[in-house]
Amino acid sequence: MTTLINTALVALDANLGTDTPSVIRRLAELVAGTGRSTDVESLYADALAREQKTATGVPGGIAIPHCRSSAVREATLAMARLSPAVDFGAKDGPADIVFFIAAPAGADNEHLKLLSKLARSLIKKDFTAALRAAATPEEIVALVDGALAEAPKPSTAADGPAAATAPASAPVTSAAPKRLVAVTACPTGIAHTYMAADSLVEAAKEAGIDLQVETQGSGAVTPLDPAVIAAADAVIFAVDVDVRGKERFAGKPVINAPVKRGIDEPAKMIQEALAAATDPHAHRVPHFGAEEAAEHNAEAAGEHLGTKVKKVLLTGVSYMIPFVAGGGLLIALGFLLGGYGLGLNGQADHILADNTLLNLPDGGNLLLYLGAVAFKIGGLSMGFLVPALAGYIAFGIADRPGIAPGFTAGAVAVFMGAGFLGGLVGGLLAGLAAYWIGTWQVPRWLRGLMPVVIIPLLGSIIASGAMLLFLGGPIAALSNGLNHWLTGMSGASAVVLGIVLGLMMCFDLGGPVNKVAYAFAVAGLGTGSALNHAPWEIMATVMAAGMVPPLAMALATVIDKKRFSLAERENGKAAWLLGASFISEGAIPFAAADPLRVIPSTMLGGAVTGAITMGFHVTSQAPHGGIFVFFAIGNIGMFITAILVGTVVAALAVVALKRWAVRAPAAAAETPATGQLVSQNS
């Protein structure tokens, strides 16, 4: 018998609410009530965030909300048979059977295999019929135990992330392709990955097609045999994340779709793959790992140049942030232990050179030494900021062959003093150079050397040479001028900068404008010191303003509940934690539902917060974490005050707009639940 589920985790014919957030909250409470979760709010927030990425409803009236969460003590299943059914985003209607999968952040592979096995069982009609017919929680637990105890079928990789195979079981015409391969993957790697694999396998069996699937889930991945890939007529990628080892499929006709489509429309995907296999103009997996979106989606959908540039820049920023987050917090910890003097005149280097932990001189200060250690590690981590930015911008354009030229160009930008702007330019040059070289038609014997030798070598020469010879100097001059201007800001000009940054952080809640402001602050973080607080003040302004939107929406749902729907009130509860953690995206559900009232209100609050933080010289040496990195905040009192004032201003503004910013009754009517403007003629 498994420990994943017990009768206390089962709710039969229960009314858990009328919308997805309500059901997820009640199931999170069920898990916490058994002692398997330490914090209902954290578990609920993690599960809801996962749900907002991709709806978890699947055909047949089933939903499988799931998440990994640090608030979960042990892998757990909670099950509810809903009355009434609730819409979880499935195409065929609401779900009445809901399994909530809560996995610890570090769940072991055995638990993950069991959870994925349950998810696969839910596509079996006899199993779901038995769940609907069960009269007691004990029967549900027995059914689940039985499903998890079933021996895996050789053709379906049921016990983990192995290759799933659908052997040909029906005759097909000699002209029809008979061999397909597929990869399935989802962000969590627990449920959708394996359900999509099984759905595709079943559809392939019905069509008489040989299909082998590689499930790139949470555990170890068993790759498809290279011979199987070579023999395949086409490939299906049912994924929400990047395919690992995509270059193995280079040249194959490809059907690319979200993982949920592999569950909802497996037969259609099989037919599309078969059609692609015989179509000389079908999209193909690019050679040398060049970004699929550049060759496929851009050509098919006519993607604008600006959109492509935005994507690759945000790719670079997203990969850069972990270096900055770890490094910035370590530097802050170093200052906390050893004081700001560590950053002056190489003091940290002198301490580390003259002493060791086991050989401190008489009267040696252990805290000072440990502070120097943390400061040095943090500084080295921050040193990767520009190279990582450039490297992963190039990666966004040319995939893995672009990483080495990008990192090299970024290092040259650091050497030239071109900083963040130099990293942007160098990364773009390196990516474009690597992508261009990857399109060369070369002899077969040279192809194996292209991605590991030729592209990195020539790409580095082109991009880094251009930076050294032509571009680095002018960009360095521009960067230095910008830094001196910002450093010299004080008084009214600093307040104006705070207002601008606050407006940018609240304009699109995690979108491109928000990311530009955040990247600008993070890029300068490493240049801050005891003698130059300006970069730290900018970082504090950006973080404080970014916390305002979710906190303001949470407060607004408390001030005037009737102006918000039940779903929004539930989102408001989670927004408290999201806002405190500096996750601006916590306000997106509100902005999506009512952008003309919510976005101006949050921008107003963010501008007020930005003005206060810059005006009172609040600093932050940490790039993320919100209130939870209080030890890295200078003038913590004004930091909190600025956030509170901005939150109250934004909350009052949105409530006022929902009450009074309405059209004339003849033209529109206001819905009582959300305060939306609705045309009477609609």
Image (spheres, rainbow, N blue to C red):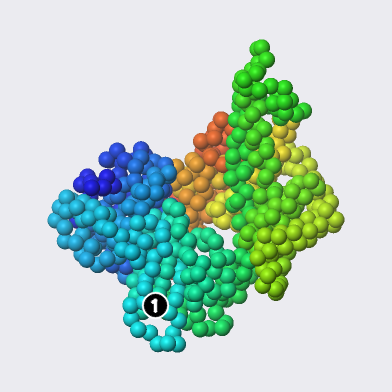
Q: Is residue 251 above or below residue 647?
A: below
Q: Tell me if 597 is positioned left or right of 418 in this view.
A: left
Residue at 37% across / 61% down in the picture? 157
Q: Residue furthest right?
A: 469
Q: Which residue is mark 1?
A: 209
Q: Is residue 291 above or below residue 623?
A: below
| Residue 590, x across and y down, in percent | 45, 55
| Residue 439, x across and y down, in percent | 69, 71
Number of marks in the rendered image: 1
> Is residue 44 shown to the viewer in this render?
no
* Amino acid beneath label 1: Ile
User: Which of the pair 459/343 is nearer the observer?
Assistant: 459
User: Which of the pair 205/602 is nearer the observer?
Assistant: 205
The quarter of the rendered structure image containing the C terminus is: bottom left
Residue at 83% across / 53% down in the picture? 468
Q: Tell me if 51 is positioned left or right of 413 in this view.
A: left
> Is residue 214 shown to the viewer in this render?
yes
User: Which of the pair 285/626 is nearer the observer?
Assistant: 285
User: Which of the pair 551/27 is nearer the observer?
Assistant: 27
Residue at 75% across / 59% down in the picture? 457
Mark 1: secondary structure: loop
| Residue 447, x across and y down, in percent | 67, 68
How crowded is the residue under tag 1: few (<14 C-alpha within 10 Å), some, or many (20+)? many
Residue at 81% across / 58% down in the picture? 466
Q: Tell me if 573 is positioned left or right of 242 in this view.
A: left
Q: Residue furthest top?
A: 362
| Residue 314, x across and y down, in percent | 61, 56
Q: Is residue 409 above or below residue 35?
A: below
